[in-house]
Structures are given as structure tokens and as C-alpha cells.
Amino acid sequence: MPVIDFGPFLDGSQVDQQAVADQMRQASRDWGFFYLANCGMPADRLADTFAASKNFFALPVDEKSQVAWQSAESNRGYVGIKRERLDPSRPGDLKEAFNLAPEQPQDVHKNLWPAGRPEFESAMTDFLDECIRAADRVLEAFALALEQPSDFFVDAHNQHHHTLRLLHYPPLPEGFEPHDGESRAGAHTDYGSITLLFQDDVGGLEVQTRAGEWIRATPIPGTVVVNTGDLMHRWTNHVFCSTPHRVNVAPEHRHRDRYSIAFFCHPNKDAEIACIDSCATAENPPLYGPITAGQHLHEKLTNTYGT
């Protein structure tokens, strides 16, 4: 999987920025995944967020269940172990999660916060802001890669309908063997435009190559994993991949907790997702008609969680 230094895009010349954008385009065409170094995320902010995540998941199940996930429409709150099944053909995933999102005054659904834990809410709110800033710069680079104005994707995401997801994969108990098909997270693609994934040192993420081989995306300190999702795949007329990935248990880490933090970027709900002009040719005409981003996301969530 490619490793791309984002520093020259943040601080370099136009030539430097174009070079980074070209690397991102190639990686997204060939892999749909890449490591991004120097993305601008403060290391202390990331460490604080991982610490807050660990503290939340260490709470009693009864307390976590007070802020349980309720519906695809809200997509916020605590998701218990095996509640989610990313691969519909497999058993429930061996993980727990907590979803939150940037809040807007007009939102019907609000974030669900555990009572009496203001430090958790503060840490997550601060991290959300940092993720939005980092994602906007990555989206600017993708716009440059696709010969669009720099604000093309940022404007389509300016209502910040993103989802921040804390993930905890508990260790497997002594003597426990997963049932057939069980995994920490089943094979799936992401729903939105791009995802920023922050990993701890345990790892377990596996990415499927075009040849169908599963390879480990071993954590690299100081990087974030970036991947393009289903909407970007559709938006770019299949120029960018939406690559299947999963989380499995490496034998050497089966008795360790794994924590990760995913920031899923979604366009504005009313944004029209239609083929980008630079991604269509006479030989490769648009493959899809327009759809709104909101319609697409709701369909995906309903398929994952059921009605």
C-alpha cells in the first residue's frame, strides 16, 4: 500500500501540491487505500482521543447501553458487540462502537453522550473539529487530482454530514475460537466519499487487492489510512476504487484489545452525485444516473443494521 507525504501539499508550492495530488490519484485508482503522513492532525489531540475512547469502552455495559444506537436515521450512539454485521452473509462482528457526528442547529437527531462525563464529550468535539480540517485539505487534493476547482469537494461537504466512529475490538478469551465466518469486522466497503482511519499499534486491518488477495495494512506510526468509498467510486465513474476491507485477528494479537478511530466523510444530504466530467470519455461514458448523497447513505445503513 502506498505511503504519501502530505506535508508538501499543506506547505509547498503549486508544483508540490500537484505532485501530491497525482500520487493520491494513482493510489486511489490502483488501491483505493493509502497511508498519508503529515496530514496535520496534532499528535497530542489524537492521543487524548484514543485515551477517551478506551475510557468509554471500559464503562459497564449498562451505562453504555443508556446511549445505545437507535436507527439508521440518527446513526449515533453505542453499538454493542455482534449488533452490526458489515458482511450480510456472515455472523455479527466481534466489536463494539460509538458513533457521533458534527451537530447542526437544524438537526433532528443529536449526539448521545454518557451522563456525567463532560470530559468525553469535550475530547470528541475537539477531535471532530480537527478531523473536519484534515479531511477538507484531503478533499482539496482530490479535487486537484481530478482537475476540478479546489473547493469542488469541500463545498459538497460543507454541511459536515460526517460520522466519527470509535471502535473497540475486545481480546478473544482463552480457548475461544470464532465460529465459521466470524471476524472482528466483516468484509465491506465504506459508504461515503473518503474515510480517515487512525489505528493503534495492534492492527488487524486487511485490504483486498485487485487480484483478490487479502493483505495486512500494518499500522505505520505518524500516518492515517485514507480510503475512497462507494460514493467516490460512483462519483468518479469507477476511476477511484472502493476497496473491500475487513478486520481479522492476527494470531499474535488475539489476546490484545484493538482500538481504532474512523472518520467517515459524507457529502451534504442533498448533494447530487453525478459523474465528474474529467472521469467520463466517449469510450467510458457515465455508468450511473444522479443520486443524492442522503439517499445513498440511508440505503447502505438500512442494509447494514436492518429496519
Image (cartoon, rainbow, N blue to C red):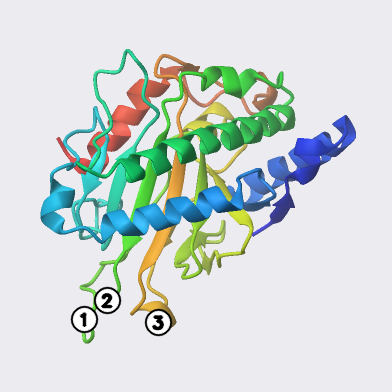
Q: How packed is label 1: few (under 14 Cα within 10 Å), some, or many (20 or more)?
A: few
Q: Residue at x 68, y 27 (%)?
A: 143
Picture disc at residue 176: 1
Of mark 1 and mark 3, the one earlier in the sequence is: 1
**Quick one: SS at disc 3?**
helix
Q: Position of residue 217 (x, y in %)?
A: 55, 64
Residue 172 disc label: 2
**The C terminus sits in image quarter:** top left
Q: Quadrant of residue 66?
A: top left
Image quadrant assignment for residue 76? top left
Question: Label 2 vs label 3: CA separation?
Answer: 10 Å
Q: Is residue 152 left or right of residue 76?
A: right
Eyeballing the image, is 223 above or below 203?
above
| Secondary structure of residue under mark 2 | loop
Tell me the residue that label 3 is attached to. 251
Q: Quadrant of residue 149?
A: top right
Give me the residue at 16% from left, 59% from top: 60
Q: Are marks 1 and 2 in contact (CB under 8 Å)?
A: yes
Question: Which quarter shows the N terminus?
Answer: bottom right
Residue 287, percent across and down? 52, 26
- CA separation in Å, label 1 and label 3: 12 Å
Residue type (three-letter) at the residue carrying disc 3: Pro
Residues at circles 1 and 3 in contact by the CB criterion of under 8 Å: no
The amino acid sitting under disc 2 is Leu
User: Of helix, strand and loop, which one carries label 1?
Assistant: loop
The earlier-in-sequence mark between 2 and 3 is: 2
Q: Amino acid at mark 1?
A: Phe
